[in-house]
Image (cartoon, rainbow, N blue to C red):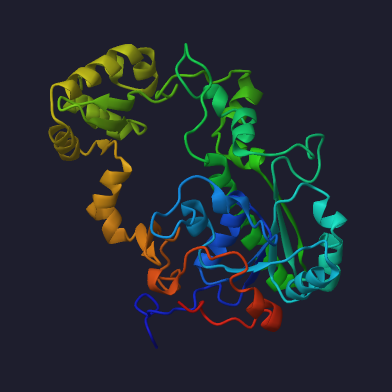
Amino acid sequence: MPDPAHDPTPSGPLADVRVLDLATVIAGPNCARYLADFGATCIKVERPGIGDSLRNMAWRDPSDGTGLWWKLVNRNKWTVALDLTEPADRAVLLDLAGEADVLVENFRPGTLERLGVGPETLLARNPRLVVTRVTGFGQTGPYRQRPGFATIAESMSGLAAITGTPDGPPLLPPIALTDEVTGLAAAFATMTALHHARVVGEGQVVDVTLIESLLQIMSPLVTLYGATGEMQQRMGAGLPYSVPRGTYQCADGLWVGVSASSDSVAARLMELLGVGGDARFASFAARVEHRLEIEAILAEWCATRSRPEVIAAFERAEAAVGPVMTMADIAADPHYRERQAIVAVDGTVMQGPLAKLSRTPARPPESSWSGRALDADGDLVRADGWGLPSRPAR
């Protein structure tokens, strides 16, 4: 029996799953990408002549002019252009959906229904189909028709309210955080529904939202307010319950990140800083009460040592520290390299698959492909449906 960890062309644990990706931009397409990474056959459906707007967003690959977002988010997908207002193209979609396991879309609520391919129609055609709907606010509720973007979710989920310095404005993350989190949430929910479909033979609609996906990662702040009426305030890099915590500049101008979110780690850190017997820093509550003092001690300690010296001392003490790394640092880092956290797909560098599975790993880079040209596989999909080879011709 071949070892899947060393098989150059493994089928992947989701090799028997068929996914139709009607979604655009990031969150919905990322849901489909995670499934495709682990072997699912994924067909991306786009509008003729226009395609997904992600094709033209932000940076482009200087080697071929293709959008870098596009290459990553739509890797391992086949692509076909269909005009769902045209009966012939709508029939193609319904034929594909009839044999699919999952359909992912992120139109505003009611759009699929107006096109004549809503969940009722899809499930009548294929009762085992999982229809994953990714929107800003959901299929129900007073905000359901509002346009949903990551920035809006970050503003409305409580994240922006606690991000930034106490005397500064609320801040937004400098990445598409909500879209990335929602893609993961949608993939998890889709797999949960797919398991049900496989066991019971019953498909369903999966309703995933940007605002609720981000709300899920807000820790117990919802619970805190419900129980006490207290709201976390903006504290820069600090946390109200864990001190010290933040980034600190070293003597060579480089920075480290430090966390003391475990009592045992904090105790070792206090010993390293020479204040191990100080009652002010002996517990979480005491350190929080004396936040300014311990933060000043750590900042001064780091400022008198180079970053390599700081990291070496922390490692000897078994305290938690990490260098503040740029993308250049990450690209050269041996741990990322050994883990294959960064790979080259069709010559384009990008993140590797989300997780390592010991017996059923994701597609390896050499069996993967980056996002393809608009309607690149249109003739094949129209002629053969799901009768696709293991990967497109190079």
Residue 182 screen position, x and y as percent:
59, 47
Residue at coordinates 20% horizontally, 19% vertically from top-left?
Answer: 275
Residue at coordinates 60% horizontally, 77% vertically from top-left?
Answer: 16
Quarter of the figure with the N terminus = bottom left
Residue 138 screen position, x and y as percent:
75, 44
Against 320, residue 380 (above or below) is below
Against 393, residue 156 (above or below) is above
Identify the image quadrant of residue 282: top left
Residue 365 screen position, x and y as percent:
39, 68
Quarter of the figure with the C terminus = bottom left
Identify the image quadrant of residue 49: bottom right
Residue at coordinates 14% horizontally, 36% vertically from top-left?
Answer: 308
The answer to whether 99 appears left or right of 259 in the picture is: right
The answer to whether 373 appears left or right of 346 in the picture is: right
Q: Residue furthest bottom?
A: 1
- Residues 287 and 247: in front is 247
Residue at coordinates 38% horizontally, 17% vertically from top-left?
Answer: 288
Exactly how many numbered labels are in the figure? 0
Residue 199 screen position, x and y as percent:
70, 72
